[in-house]
Amino acid sequence: MRTLLIIFFLTVPFVSFSQTIFPSLSPKGRIEQKIGLTNISVDYERPAARGRKVFGELVKYDKLWRTGAGNCTKIGFSKPVVISNKNISKGTYSIFTIPGTSEWTVILNKDTTLYGVTSYDATKDIIRFKVKAHPTDRYYESLTIDIDIVPNNAIVYLSWENTQISFQVKTESDKLVNDFIQQYLLTDKSQNSDEYAEAAEYYYYLNKDLDRAVVLIDKAIAMKRESWYYRQKVDILEMQKKYEEAIDCATLAISIDQKRTNWDSRTKQQSETEYKKRIEFFKRQKN
């Protein structure tokens, strides 16, 4: 009995220790990014080159690849998106690829339970599309997936060794925002002045529909004379190069700010100084 107890106490710590000491050769990676109004996430396992030639040897050309290691790589969308001109429903999908020397096939598949490619079923593909492969300036030791933000849309990058592919994911954010503006703001259904100002700011930062942006910020100002509403209108008019109107708006803003009872004299002076600098700039632009 004593011998058995000694063996037990010697063995248990060793088993527990051995289960945690060895790091994964392909550690799990995750990236999640909000794009406009849509959340995009990628879960994958990240194999490393470890001195091996990756594409063409470790990962064969013209052969289906799990695009990672271990369990299938998964990409999820919280709202419908558009990829390669095809509507993709919200949900989570597995990513497979067929690498080539200069062109890859990217595949999104409904089955997210796969390990490797053995049970891959092409009938469950929801989309296949081609992308160009490009050399990279830096060397990627481990498979790296990243998401870049292009106003309200995304570009997904996949990089490993000295090779990179990418594809665009278009969200419905612009459509949802424009529908809201059309249905609730331009019809004066909303009683929230900030919504009108935020809509104007939305157009301003995208540098589009600036005439509509002015209409929206004017609606906000008519409801409430917030200082940042006037600054927003001056910014929009400057972008339109309507310098005379920008001067008038800035002059009015100085007058209103000086009457604000919730501002101290220093804040009022700072605001006036800033507006006067902008007025001088607009005058020079006119000339």
Image: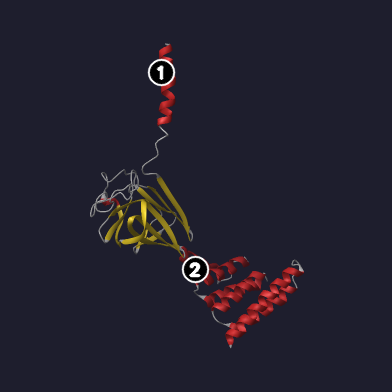
Q: Quick one: 215 or 170, which is closer to the camera?
A: 170
Q: Quick one: 204 or 110, which is closer to the camera?
A: 204
Q: CA distance from mark 1 to mark 2?
A: 71 Å
Badge 2 amino acid: Asn
Q: Quick one: 202 or 105, which is closer to the camera?
A: 105
Q: Is residue 11 left or right of residue 115?
A: right
**In the rendered view of the protein, which quadrant contains the N terminus?**
top left
Q: Is residue 140 above or below residue 175?
A: above
Residue 163: x and y, percent? 32, 58
The number of numbered badges drawn on the structure is: 2
Q: Which residue is mark 1?
A: 7
Please tell me which residue is depicted at 57% across the width and 78% down the height of the picture. Answer: 238
Residue farthest top in this picture: 1
Q: Is residue 245 above or below residue 199?
A: below
Q: Is residue 183 left or right of residue 53?
A: right
* Lower sequence index among marks 1 and 2: 1
Mark seen at residue 178? 2
Mark seen at residue 62? none
Secondary element under disc 1, as helix, strand or loop, is helix
Q: Is residue 65 above or below residue 129?
A: above
